[in-house]
Amino acid sequence: MAEEATLVIIKPDAIQRGLTGAVLSRFDPLRLDVIGVKAVRVSQELAESHYHHLREKPFFREIVDYLQGRLHGTNYVLAFVFWGENAIEGVRQVTGATHPEKAEPTSIRGSLGRMMTSGLMENVVHASSDRSEAEREIALWFKPHELLRPVSRGAAGLPAAPSAAQAGAQRAAGAKRSK
Ligand code: GDP
């Protein structure tokens, strides 16, 4: 099984309810490395990009507001990149299904998530669902220098090193700036 990276976000409902430690401890048995972590004030642009695949859904505006903390009176989330063998599937299993009432009762979402009467799914945590999503999301939330190790294209698809053409262009730009 390959080592790979995955993105986890502790969502505003978990921040508001003081569940950060409870959520993180659920991942401990997976024995994954944390290679990136930060507190993020989520801009509208970031939230919309994160949920880009759901932009046509009727609940799109609601989940953008949710991720920004507008529904919970909070103004940040905690973002993590976990690294290790089978990280994506392992984290997803611990996280549980999207709908808190359909999630395994022992999973994070099944035990800590809840459906609001408004229809909002307060599901506590986000976890990338597959490699292409992990690739896109990690690049969206983290700059390469914010990660403790490069994440190879084969593992979670992040750009490990610039191509020869990009490197040439960057050198040329650097040379121009230093003049
Ligand atoms: P995830 O990968 O399990 O988080 O699921 P998705 O990427 O499909 O959905 C992103 C988020 O949108 C979920 O975590 C929920 O917060 C929310 N969501 C998904 N489906 C629905 C839905 O049918 N209704 C509402 N109100 N929210 C939803």
Image (cartoon, helix red, strand yellow):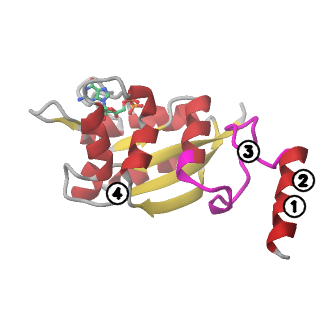
Q: Main structural element of the magenta stretch: helix, strand or loop?
A: loop
**Viewer can see residue 30:** no
**Location of the N terminus (image quadrant):** top right
Q: In this view, does 40 lie to the left or right of 142?
A: left
- The segment highlighted magenta reads 140-163
- Camera-nearest label, 3 or 1: 1
Considering only order in the chain, which callout, 1 or 3, is on the residue closer to the N terminus? 3
Name the mark nearer the viewer: 4 or 2: 2
Of label 4 and label 2, which has the lower sequence position? 4
Tag 1 residue = 171
What amino acid does circle 4 point to?
Thr
Let me know if residue 29 is in the magenta part. no
Percent position (x, y) of residue 144? 67, 56
Q: Does the magenta stretch include residue 152?
A: yes
Residue name at image x 62 percent, y 56 percent: 143
Q: Residue 54 carries which label?
A: none
Kind of element beneath mark 4: helix
- Name which of mark 4 and mark 1 comes first in the sequence: 4
The residue lying at 32 percent from left, 46 percent from top is 67
Circles 4 and 2, Cβ within 8 Å, touching? The answer is no
Drawn side of residue 129 relative to residue 66, left or right: right
Q: Which of 94 and 81 is in front in this view?
A: 81
Would you call the spot at circle 1 few (<14 residues within 10 Å), some (14-19), or many (20 or more)? Answer: few
Tell which circle, 2 or 3, labels the residue nearer the N-terminal end: 3
Q: Mark 3 points at which residue?
A: 159
Vertical comparison of 57 with 165: above or below: above
User: Type of residue at label 1?
Assistant: Arg
Contact check, label 3 and label 1, Cβ < 8 Å: no
> Residue visible at 87% across and 68% down?
175
- The residue that disc 4 covers is 20
The amino acid on which the numbered mark 2 sits, given as a three-letter code, is Gly
